[in-house]
Amino acid sequence: MDITTNDDWVATDDDNVFYATTSDPRVLAVIERDTEASVADTFDGDGINPIIYVDHSRGRLSFSHEAGFDGGEADLMQRAYDEWGWGTPTARRWLWIFHGIAAENAWGGYDRSGNWIVATSRAYAENVGNEPAATFEDARKDCESMAKEVGEALDGNVFGIGYATLEGRVLDEGEIDLDEWTIDIECWGFVGEQYAKSEAATFEHGGPDLPELINDDVFREHTDYLAEQDIRDAELADRG
């Protein structure tokens, strides 16, 4: 089906579901917030920067790998902290010179007992087939976009995308009661509200299987024809 999505996204009362009307009055584009999403599930995969959690709830820092590629970066960060203290010039130089490790903080909303860090490393660059960064600043910049995505996830902005259908809605009748529609989420794990909307609008990840909608003008002409046929049938019946 060739469906065009309108730029009129509407949020439900709890801001967990957003929908937009389309060129087919029976179909809405839909995104739904994944309230159970975790960093580990959302960023699972060796092609993603190492994501490290730094727990400081017990009076000392504890580094643990949580998601993305694991080339031992968390263990090396732990060693640097234990030897020289985290964030000291010596620790930073050691991580960079010997292991090509640089990192960027990912700020987000739900866990304040520690910090989330997105890292890069020589091992990670080799794993994804890239040349290692030439400078520490270049390596740190490699982490920036992923750090922003992790921050979005920490703020709860992970969505599934799909559509809603109401087959009986032949014409655009204005007000929508989403409780009357059937919602199908085709794919989860889209980070960021705007990105999820842009992906849902295309229906490239799956769309409804509905019969072709009769053109509005054709539908009205057909309806008029049926009404005229009823009148003619009634006249013939009256004539006996």
Image: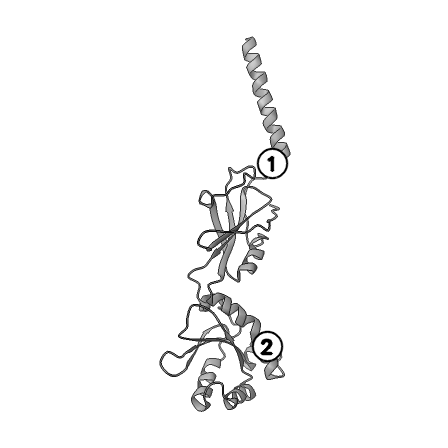
Instruction: Say what secondary structure mark 1 lies in.
Output: loop
Badge 1 density bin: few <14, some 14–19, many ≥20, Cα 10 Å: few
What is the x, y in percent for residue 174? 54, 40
Q: How much space separates mark 2 and mark 1, taking CA atoms?
A: 52 Å
Where is mark 2, residue-wise?
Answer: 141
Left or right: 60 as drawn, with respect to 143: left
Q: Amino acid at mark 2?
A: Lys
Q: Residue at x 45, y 68 (%)?
A: 109
* Nearer mark to the viewer, of 2 and 1: 2
Q: Residue at x 54, y 10 (%)?
A: 238
Q: Amino acid at mark 1?
A: Ile
Where is mark 1, residue-wise?
Answer: 214
Q: Report whether residue 102 is seen.
A: yes
Instruction: Say what secondary structure mark 2 lies in.
Output: helix
Task: Looking at the image, tell me whether mark 2 or mark 1 is earlier in sequence order.
Answer: 2
What is the x, y in percent for residue 179? 44, 45
